[in-house]
Image: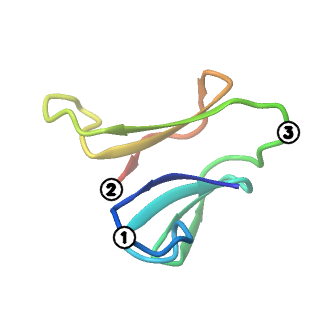
Amino acid sequence: LRIGFSIARCSPIMGDTEDSICFDSSGSLLFNRKQVPVTGKFLQDCTLAVVLNLDPDSPNNNTLSLFKDGRRQAPPQQL
C-alpha cells in the first residue's frame, strides 16, 4: 500500500520519481526511489490519512504528515 501525492501525468508508481511522494505500508517515506523509515508497519483494519500542509502562515508549511486512526505517526516531513 502506498498513500501520498503526485503531479498530473507522472509515473503510476508513487515514490519512484521526484514527481510524487508517499508513505508505504512498511512505514517509510518514499521519494525519488529513496526510502526513509519514519514509523512502524500498518496492519489491516486501520484508517490512514495524509495531510499536505501548504499554508504559508503555518510553522509546518510545505510538509506532509501521516495519521493512523486519528493519531500522528511521525513528525511532519518536509517536501
The residue at which mark 1 appears reads as 9
The residue at which mark 2 appears reads as 79
| Residue under the point 14% across and 35% down | 56
Q: Give the residue at the far left of this rendering.
A: 57
Give the residue type that dot 3 points to: Gln
Among the two numbered marks 1 and 3 on one chain, the one whose residue lies closer to the N terminus: 1
Query: Considering the numbered disc 3 on the image, is that residue within a helix, a strand or a loop?
Result: loop
Q: Determine whether, in the image, residue 2 is placed left or right of residue 31.
A: right
CA–CA distance in space, label 3 to label 2? 28 Å
Nearest to the eye among marks 3 and 2: give it: 3
What is the count of numbered marks? 3
Check whether the beta carbons of the residues at disc 1 and disc 2 lie within 8 A of each other.
no
Residue 44 bears which disc, if any? Answer: 3
| Residue under the point 56% across and 71% down | 13
**Which of the two residues, 33 or 11, is positioned nearer the viewer here?**
11
Nearest to the eye among marks 1 and 2: give it: 1
| Other-residue count near label 1 (Cα within 10 Å), few / some / many at <14 / 14–19 / ≥20 | few
| Residue under the point 45% across and 60% down | 21
Quarter holding the N terminus is bottom right
